[in-house]
Amino acid sequence: MFLDEIIRRSLEEDLGSGDITTKYLDLEPTIATAFMIAKAEGVIAGAEIAKMVFKTVDPDLKITLYRKDGDSVVKGDEIMRIEGKPSSILQGERTALNFLQRLSGIATKTNRMVKLIEGTKTKLLDTRKTTPLLRSLEKHAVRIGGGFNHRAGLFDMILIKENHIRAAGGITSAINRVKQHNTTYRVEVEVTNAEEVKEAFTVGVDRIMLDNMSLKEIRAAVKAYGKKVEFEVSGGITEDNILAYARTGVDFISSGALTHSYQSLDISLLFKE
Amino acid sequence: MFLDEIIRRSLEEDLGSGDITTKYLDLEPTIATAFMIAKAEGVIAGAEIAKMVFKTVDPDLKITLYRKDGDSVVKGDEIMRIEGKPSSILQGERTALNFLQRLSGIATKTNRMVKLIEGTKTKLLDTRKTTPLLRSLEKHAVRIGGGFNHRAGLFDMILIKENHIRAAGGITSAINRVKQHNTTYRVEVEVTNAEEVKEAFTVGVDRIMLDNMSLKEIRAAVKAYGKKVEFEVSGGITEDNILAYARTGVDFISSGALTHSYQSLDISLLFKE
Amino acid sequence: MFLDEIIRRSLEEDLGSGDITTKYLDLEPTIATAFMIAKAEGVIAGAEIAKMVFKTVDPDLKITLYRKDGDSVVKGDEIMRIEGKPSSILQGERTALNFLQRLSGIATKTNRMVKLIEGTKTKLLDTRKTTPLLRSLEKHAVRIGGGFNHRAGLFDMILIKENHIRAAGGITSAINRVKQHNTTYRVEVEVTNAEEVKEAFTVGVDRIMLDNMSLKEIRAAVKAYGKKVEFEVSGGITEDNILAYARTGVDFISSGALTHSYQSLDISLLFKE
Amino acid sequence: MFLDEIIRRSLEEDLGSGDITTKYLDLEPTIATAFMIAKAEGVIAGAEIAKMVFKTVDPDLKITLYRKDGDSVVKGDEIMRIEGKPSSILQGERTALNFLQRLSGIATKTNRMVKLIEGTKTKLLDTRKTTPLLRSLEKHAVRIGGGFNHRAGLFDMILIKENHIRAAGGITSAINRVKQHNTTYRVEVEVTNAEEVKEAFTVGVDRIMLDNMSLKEIRAAVKAYGKKVEFEVSGGITEDNILAYARTGVDFISSGALTHSYQSLDISLLFKE
Amino acid sequence: MFLDEIIRRSLEEDLGSGDITTKYLDLEPTIATAFMIAKAEGVIAGAEIAKMVFKTVDPDLKITLYRKDGDSVVKGDEIMRIEGKPSSILQGERTALNFLQRLSGIATKTNRMVKLIEGTKTKLLDTRKTTPLLRSLEKHAVRIGGGFNHRAGLFDMILIKENHIRAAGGITSAINRVKQHNTTYRVEVEVTNAEEVKEAFTVGVDRIMLDNMSLKEIRAAVKAYGKKVEFEVSGGITEDNILAYARTGVDFISSGALTHSYQSLDISLLFKE
Amino acid sequence: MFLDEIIRRSLEEDLGSGDITTKYLDLEPTIATAFMIAKAEGVIAGAEIAKMVFKTVDPDLKITLYRKDGDSVVKGDEIMRIEGKPSSILQGERTALNFLQRLSGIATKTNRMVKLIEGTKTKLLDTRKTTPLLRSLEKHAVRIGGGFNHRAGLFDMILIKENHIRAAGGITSAINRVKQHNTTYRVEVEVTNAEEVKEAFTVGVDRIMLDNMSLKEIRAAVKAYGKKVEFEVSGGITEDNILAYARTGVDFISSGALTHSYQSLDISLLFKE
């Protein structure tokens, strides 16, 4: 879905057969001013999307962004200003916040983990463990937080996993089969021990994913082949252990938690007195 | 969107122009068996949806549910069994898990909070702070966890908030305006102090939302009007303080965190040896 | 569907693979002026929708509304003025009229019935007997005519009908089952005799629908419980008997005929000499 | 829209965020049997569509049609039998009836007018004055009632109206312009007096529409050119005057009222004891 | 599909999860100017569509058309000028060209064949052998090239083919069956020999399609009935033989090759130094 | 769009408001058998799609494929057999053929070019010069013909073109900018002379596209760097010169003509006597 369709359908979900509170209040038209205010510290992502939500509800709303994606906020900071009909502001409020808070939550968590490995060569990657229908937005938030994007889906990178390997009769066979057809995509293979690292390296791939291997095994793999192939570590990464993994010298650490277990950033919409 | 469209578009998001790993592996067709296994303790929600994901990818996949929505699992429990072409299983895996893990995460968190207030008369409600496009699924997960659903959107209950009140020139005026047109919906009004509680009660509504009021103020409101109107407490509810709020005797506590800041339940898909 | 999609698809239905008359006439571009003229007496509803139809065909058309929704017209009154390319006007004409005439027909019929019960406390309600895909427009027309809206669909009010009652094992059981889960919606129950009225009242609901009961029975019900529960009369309401029903003192009369058996208001589009 | 999409979206309109009555009743699954019963005399149209509505709600419902499109019914006749889960039957009921009653209403009205002109050579035509989004269904109902279809939209027949004529600088010019491009479509031209009939006939068209002309003028036109060109009468046709128009010997009479001002046929769904 | 939806989805096909080259180049915003340049001789069709593609990508792009549909170009001619952000131009480039080159290819081929039969009374028709989803655009290109449109689909003209005839029990029976219901559409019948021509003419149709008949047979048919019915020749028409067919005096020659086997016109987008 | 939506909308394009020939013939239901017959030599692609078209029109049609994608046919070969209602076969015929003929045309042309370079190491690639909305089908046909797929769109491979280079201030700068963000995609850069080849190689990319360079220059590039980077030749490839280009030792030759200027394979549907 294009972004405007995501926004439109999200509004449809909330508005359904009509905002009955506003309809039955039947107020005289007036102009009000409201502000999005940060209630906690974090990194903003989704500001433009929140703006689009309001403009979709009512093109006459005037939106001023005080913070753009990637900016840091502390409690009390004004993120954006919305001016126009109160009923329009209230109809967009919840949907705009539902996007902005979630995406800022992802950017904030990503940024925290990226800072933990600053100074190492390791890049933090996201995964496909994203919210259904919102993947491109969540991957945008990861970039905003300082992370890098792994593949966007099953369609833009080849990742040979354990089960592919078994079905193909081994690592060597799986990689060779893929090479016969592929002219466009990077090839990554998932391995679980030193022997498999060696086999994958020998037959030739772009990247080797070390799945749930010990720090010691990872260091050994990097030492043996790290200049000739990329290494990615995956599985069980937390804020507590990420630096240790990064110090093994791997090129990438991928973390599903960036998008599947974050906290929404606390943000409120307040009308000005 | 109907559920089948949500599922279909979620798969479209992941499959895009095609699963290139499977396409280029070009394997002989075989039949494999895989299992969804819980990796942590929790309450399952979304089992039927995960099943629908697999059936949408390939109607020939055979799915057996060992756990249904609402069942508890501990680490190691088998949740469902999927049998069929490995490529079909792998194409559905991530999307199925992305639904199942999130919804089970919501059910698990909800269930934990519901248990904390067991024995009180208070019911735990969700809010509209849900993931855009997935609200009906997330509200289903709340029910599965033992919570109750607040309104589904702006269209099915009237909730007069602070800003409506200001625009209408006061609580009494706002409620009366709404009553003039409304024949179908319950009316709730948000108040912030004892005086407003009294005004709302006097003009007459179905429910009064006590927004960020102290335990003492809440107890006083319940004592004064609790038999004649419903009370809902909202704002700043955590696992640490929910019981104290419930013991004030309010009818409802609503919590946005149920759907905006949960952890996905850890679940894996494993192929059988 | 959002209103703009309803309009767009309605135009698609009429224009299909293209307006061949205009295409093959291949006229020089000129500017023409046309008027929507009432050919009979009635209440206008759908003026803004008709305007949107023309603007969807051609954003350069200039539309001036002489009558807005709720205004009365008599034969000969100008409702709106459309200025622009004749081909655009002709492409929008039929679709715009198809909306405007139907909705004005509903508003006119509703208004006639509302006037018949003026002075009583009874409100006239619509039903779900609306044209598929056009419900929200038709319910808007009912409001414009002075009626009130019953529920918008199966999703925003609980209405326990005869068959629900039978399946649940009786009125008391049905209502109690619903109360166990419901925290958001008004509950109405359909009854057919005095004994059922009593049972429904005793277990407690927001509204009781008296289905095809005699005027005498209705009066008795209102007398017994009318101050403590809402009553709605349904079934067989006509312009001839509506006042008699209203005089029983019921709160609501609902009429399917408002939307399933009205006459389109006669309106023509005429080009100015 | 394809028929299945019309049905699906109509159900979506009624079901919205879910049938809360059924959801909250939370009944044990049972099997019920219901019947569609005619409450008045008429001609059935839309029986297959009503069936599709139920099958879309729940493919496990078993539908038996006792009457097919075109069959006559009298009060009390069973039209179809629906067997399955009561909740599924109730969720489809209103939408199925909303289609069936409207289309049968059109077929019934059409049939009444067709019978009035039986024995003449004149065929009764519909118009484009149909309900937005439902045109193909309504035109089907007209055929079921014994009428014939005029053009389906602006795309399948050329109809040169008064305003086209003025813009093109006269009847002759308009027809000649169209002939230069057209190789596929019949050409009809609208005229208002004898002189224009002559001009249209002379330059050559397939059909001449006599708009609001007197019976005498119509008879004269038919006498002069009736064997060499088709004549269609349009404007102000009622059940009272249709036979007089038909007796003028015109080929077609077109009536907008067939689809814009009919009464729904009274049909109920009843559960079997 | 409306044109804007065709364009939108075409862009979606190319852009998918995002233009990664532009995204990762992360260039400062600048303004560039590009030109569509003809690399071969031909007739332009689709210029407005190419413009719409660019405006859909970025409404801020400024497009100036130097050639409009129907204009001839030779190698080196500038067709249009695009000014704006280079990333926007590059994102629209391929899709705009994919439309413009194909449609200009059709217009060019059509124009070449039309010129071959100039001076005869025969008109060149297209067929339904068009690219799925793009028929209305391709038929537009045929008109631009000087051809005429045959029916737009199965819905706007009646064409009785060999198999219909067989199923109906003969030409006479098939035509009579159709006449019983049809009041709107021209009727054409496909025949393969002189005897069938006679039968079709006798029962009466608007047009007779002579399918794969010899020049001699065609001439005979035209001589016998050419003043009283239209003739269309179909099957095996090439640039080499089209004039011979036209000289038989038939009204129409239809050619599937116009839309199923053309060459895209060579056009490039070049950025200005 | 998913394949089923492409098919559905293609049928909608052809069927529009209904197949009037079949509707008005109003034939008794019978069962007929038809065959798709090759009228020329070629390689079949799209057989499954043609089957899906027929099944979408009428799930009761029985389709037997005698040839699958990739099979060669000569004139007279039966490709598939369709059995069922004649009206269903006729409604699917043209759309099924429009897919099958185009895709087989692409597979046939691709196969001819692939055979011309057999024995060399060079692989033939397609481009993004595909028909809007049908890219995935056309790229499938290229693979069926023995070619390989270049990127599917702007989203799955990085291709730095001349204009990107200029905007980034040179080849080195452009490549380095991209490398800073990219962790997933292969990087290709377009060059036009030996000096640029050297620069691209030095800064490091996965593939170098030699755009309109002479055979001599290409040979020199391959000799210098061919073992360390992939080379792709693009621009002006024809059946006459492709072998000469392949013999330079480049890895890939890409050809837009495979999808923008092919001839539909001649295939007919014939009903069995």
Image (cartoon, coloured by chain):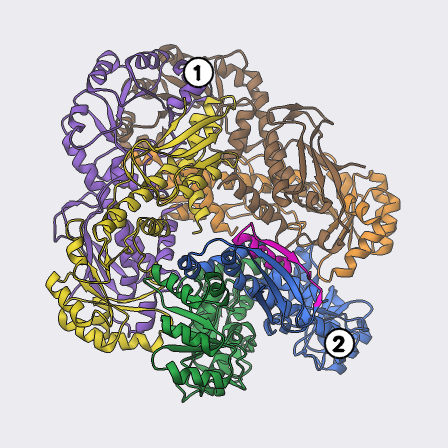
Chain colours: A green, B blue, C orange, D brown, E purple, F yellow
Left or right relative to E127: residue B157? right
Which residue is at the front of the view, E146 or B222? E146
Discs 2 and 1 carry the same chain letter = no
Residue at x 28% of width, y 32% of height = D168
**Which residue lies at the image location 73% right of the left edge and 39% below the top edge?**
C242
Image quarter of residue C183: bottom right
Q: Is residue E201 above or below residue C239?
A: above
Q: Which residues are magenta?
A: B47-72
Q: Secondary structure at mark 2?
A: helix
- Residue B116 marker: 2
- Counting labels gives 2
Separation of marks 2 and 1 at Cα, in angstroms: 80 Å
Q: Regarding mark 1 in the picture, which secondary structure is present there?
A: loop
Residue at the extreme bottom of the image, as rendered: A119
Label for residue D3? Answer: none
Label 1: few (<14), some (14–19) or many (≥20) C-alpha neighbours in 10 Å? few
Q: Amino acid at mark 1?
A: Gly
Q: Position of residue E25 (x, y in %)?
A: 30, 73
Q: Is residue D172 visible?
A: yes
- Say if residue C85 shows up in the picture: no
Q: Which residue is mark 1?
A: E169
Q: Is residue D212 left or right of residue E61?
A: right
Q: Position of residue C28 (x, y in %)?
A: 25, 39
Vertical position of residue F15 compared to residue F180: above or below: above
Q: Nearer the viewer, residue B107 or D203?
A: B107
Residue appearing at x 20%, y 47% in the figure = E265
Rendered residue at 48%/87% (across/down): A243
Q: Amino acid at mark 2?
A: Leu
Given residues C193 and B238, the one toward you in this image is B238
Answer few, some or many: residues within 10 Å of disc 2's Cα (few below 14, many 20 plus, some between 14 and 19).
Answer: some
- Measuring from the top left, give residue A151's x and y in whole percent: 42, 68
Quadrant of image for the C terminus of chain E? bottom left
